[in-house]
Amino acid sequence: MGVSSSMASAPAVEIDASSVLVLDACILISNVLRFLSLELAREHSFQPAWSAIIGDEWARNASRLWDVPVEQLWQDWEQWQREFPLADQGNVQGYKEGLQYSDPKDWHVIAAARAAQHAFPDATVRILTKNLKDFNRSELKRLGLSVVAPDHFFVAMHHQYPSKMNALLQRLPQAVVAPDKPLLSVEVLLKRERLFGLNQAYQRSVLLKGEE
């Protein structure tokens, strides 16, 4: 079972505990992507970063999509703030200055990444997002930033930490499927999120383990 050609041709992503990833609102609003990202952060695989604007975007959109009171979602946000005290980059408005080529609705995400560069001057800062087309790669490169797609990121994590990732994936169905809903397989959940490369890596590791 091989990795898809798009994944095989993608440049390697090297992440360690000092790496900073800005979690876009689209990552937090996905039960699967949020679970995997925050659990990896809890295990100190990387330093998460965000801003109040990202938090507001997540809470408002999640409230509308899930029909959940926004106040309930702010409780989750406050818990993450306590868990990751270095994540919130504060007022990032000033870091929008000079941006031109990326989608203006995502300037606040780039601004959070630029703020994180100042907060963590020795770290590599990336933006984890599903909305790659909204970010101008050349503009980010000039700023010393880059974006990474969820599948590419999680495949890299699986390559670096196979046991850790397999353990998280085994917990995934119970963690993200509502108790009143039928339990879905890891494969179904990953494919729904277009995490095809991660699913291939996971299924391959399960197959190899079964052959031991």
Image: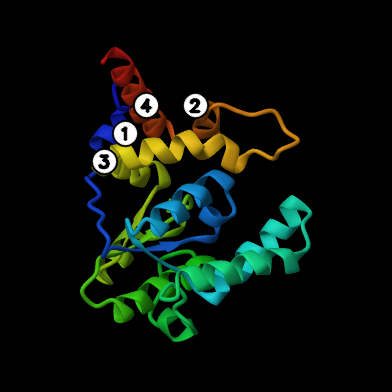
Circle 3 residue: 10
1 and 2 marks in contact (CB < 8 Å): no
Can you say which quadrant of the picture contains the N terminus? top left
Which residue does the numbered mark 4 point to in the structure image?
200
In space, the residues marked 3 and 4 are separated at their CA atoms by 16 Å
Residue 115 left/right relative to 173: left
Instruction: Give the structural element (helix, strand or loop) at label 4.
Output: helix
Q: Earlier in the sequence, mark 1 or mark 4?
A: 1
Asked if the residues shown at circle 2 and circle 4 are in contact, with their CB atoms under 8 angstroms apart, the answer is no
At horizontal 24% and vertical 43% (from top left) the residue drawn is: 160
In the rendered image, the vertical position of residue 26 relative to residue 205, given as above or below: below
Label located before the other in sequence (1 or 2) = 1
Choose between 88 and 163: the one closer to the eye.
163
Q: Nearer the viewer, mark 1 or mark 2?
A: 2
The residue type indicated by label 3 comes to Ala
Up the image or down, 158 lies above or below 147; here it is above
Please provide percent x and percent y for residue 130: 47, 50
User: Is the C-beta separation of discs 1 and 3 under 8 Å?
Assistant: yes
